[in-house]
Image (tube, helix red, strand yellow):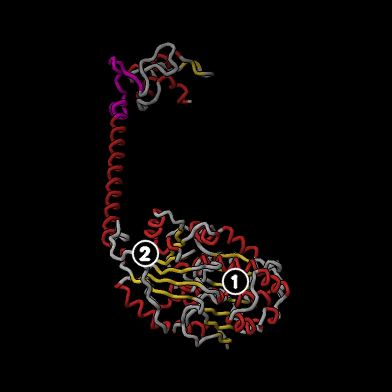
Amino acid sequence: MTFDEFGLHPKLTAAVAEMGFTRPTGVQAAAIPPALEGRDVLACAMTGSGKTAAFLLPVLNQLLEKPRGRTRVLVISPTRELAAQIHEHFQALAKHTGLTGAAIFGGVGMKPQEDAFRRQVDVIVATPGRLLDHLQYDYAKLDGIEFLVLDEADRMLDMGYLPDVSRILSHLPVRRQTLFFSATMPPQIVELSGQMLTRPARVDIERQAKPATGVKQALYPVSAELKSALFLELLKRGDVGNVIVFCRTKHRSNRLAEFLDKQGVPNARIHGNRSQTARTDALAGFRSGRYRVLVATDIVARGIDVEALEHVVNFDVPNQPEDYIHRVGRTARAEATGDAYTLFSPDEEKLVRGIEKAIGQTISRVMVPGFDYRAKPEERFEVPIGERIAEIRRRKAEERQRAREKAERKAQREAEDAARATSRSGRPGGPRRSADGQGASSGSGRSTGGSSGAPSRTSSSRSSEGSRNSSNQRRPGNGPARPGSDRSDRGSRPSGSSGGNGGRDRR
């Protein structure tokens, strides 16, 4: 079967050919025809099977027949990386159509995303959390949605996004076509699909979860403290080429990246604590070959497509068999081939047996010739959680102590400044004495004839001088002031009034 047999628009088939797709994968062959007919689709397919084109092609084909000017397609994805990748696929498939789209996810500014809502782009690919951030505002309208796609629905369940998805559904029209894609079908996902879909076409719904058929799997038993040394040995021998290596925690991924840096191995790390810019750079650098190793947590275990990825290494055995399937699914994508190696320590044997049971096969064990399995590592790979917590508490205590000392120093400076101010001004409200014992106004010394400041006087000298000046003054148009009246009036006014202004004060 070829893509031409689907009856897609020539602009889409041209883009498909330019992307190098020659024949549809199994999920594409099964899902595209009913989706083109406008039916809801419930698809359960292994990761790396080509689900993105399986939902984009039929949706875009129908979109070309509709008027433009409003957002008609919403694709919901669990992670930023997957949303960005779906948007990239959209751009490649729609390059000849003039259709517009935008990726809406966190870690970046909201303003360009707001502009996309206001422009009413044709397709929005979004993560649940950031989409809900926008839906608080009037500019984010989804009342024109005609096509809804949920990708990696089981991952949304794992990440706790199903309540967010339910809130998003309340903003959408009831009448719409829904395409529901998931790598596994736990009971909660089956229940959710029943609520969202109407008489859907079911694709591979009974398939047992297992890795892609092109994945060669192997287990490498090794003590926990020698995992990093064994991984480095595999890199040096060339047994591992470009590789995504999965760690259980962000701390362990950081430690492995630091170890590889010391050994001169080009690498980048990607996990939830990294900024979106750092995560984007890590993926771009790995895809371009700038980094040989991408150290990751399960944030990239779903949906991230790296062309011709040679190897996936589980540095830590995942806790759930489903996570193992998604991790190793990063290689052998779209029916290609690849290798998946797992380093496991004795305390992870039970997890390994659970994986083998889930996939229905025994994975071969491999020992590396010449590797010293009895060697003692130069340093601990991982600091125990108790020590890390103690170190965090110690740093917090030091920060609090520094903050207290800073506050005390500030209070001491303020007290000293207040004391100096009091010393300069003398008693509150009164004149201070200059060094030679003469009275002085605050902030000035003895005045001379050339001084720009007013001469310093005591209250009594100002009062008596004011009396003389007032008695010798003539008020304009009123003749001489009555003798004695100025003195009696001044005596009744507060001492702060200037005697020389007595006549003017009464005007």
Disc 1 marks a residue whose amino acid type is Leu
Residue 295 sits in quarter: bottom left
Mark 2, Cα crowd under 10 Å, few <14 / some 14-19 / many 20+, is many
Residue at (46, 63) in percent of width and height: 238
Q: Position of residue 436 (x, y in %)?
A: 29, 14
Query: Would residue 215 appear left or right of 173 to someone viewing this image?
Result: left
Q: How far across and down, in percent of the image, does residue 199 sit?
A: 58, 88
Q: Kindly give the residue lying farthest to the front in the view shown.
A: 370
The residue positioned 57% from the left and 81% from the top of the image is 27
Q: How far is the residue under mark 2 from the one under mark 1?
A: 52 Å
Q: Which residues are magenta?
A: 420-441
In the rendering, at what x and y percent does residue 408 appear? 27, 41
Compared with residue 354, is residue 389 higher up or lower down, i.e. above or below? above
Q: Which mark is residue 142?
A: 1
Q: Which residue is mark 2?
A: 230
Whether residue 5 is in magenta: the answer is no
Residue type at mark 2 is Leu
429 in magenta: yes
Can you say whether 191 is above or below 161 in the image?
Answer: below
Q: Residues within 10 Å of mark 1 (few under 14, many from 20)?
A: many
Task: Looking at this view, name the residue that lies furthest to the top.
Answer: 449
